[in-house]
Image (spheres, rainbow, N blue to C red):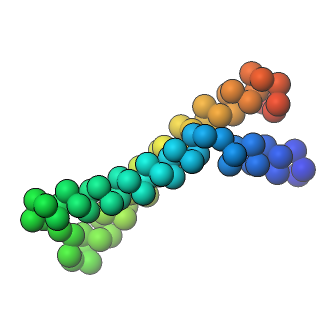
Amino acid sequence: MRRRLKLAKLLWRGKGTRKVALGLVGLRLGSHLLLGLLGAAVSTALGHVLFALVMSAVTVALLAHVQRTALGALVAAGRATA
């Protein structure tokens, strides 16, 4: 269990994770701003649910990519085992 906790700490300290977090905040704010400027702001419950589903899918895809990349780098550096 301790090995997994160490690996989780290494992943959370990575630059990629922070970039994804900041990118997602920027994507959310930017998309709301763009939709507002276009006059198509999300105002219905269904619109909010669909927006949340899209943002969730983007989040999972980006974090899976960053985790795969980071684990590969850690294994190559000898800091983690496959």
Residue lying at the far left in this picture: please name it.
Answer: 39
Residue lying at the far top in this picture: please name it.
Answer: 76
User: What quarter of the picture does the C terminus occupy?
Assistant: top right
Q: Residue at x 32, y 70 (%)?
A: 49
Residue lying at the far right in this picture: please name it.
Answer: 2
The reply to whether residue 57 is visible in this rendering is no
The reply to whether residue 35 is visible in this rendering is yes
Left or right: 10 as drawn, with respect to 69: right
- Residue 61 in the image: above or below residue 53: above
Q: Where is residue 76 shown, x and y percent of the image?
A: 74, 21
Residue 35 position by quadrant? bottom left
Q: Where is residue 18 shown, x and y percent of the image?
A: 57, 48
Q: Where is residue 48 shown, x and y percent of the image?
A: 29, 71
Q: Where is residue 6 shown, x and y percent of the image?
A: 83, 46
Q: Residue at x 20, y 56 (%)?
A: 34
Q: Residue at x 75, y 48 (%)?
A: 8
Q: Residue at x 82, y 25 (%)?
A: 78
Left or right: 5 as drawn, with respect to 63: right
- Residue 29 in the image: above or below residue 77: below
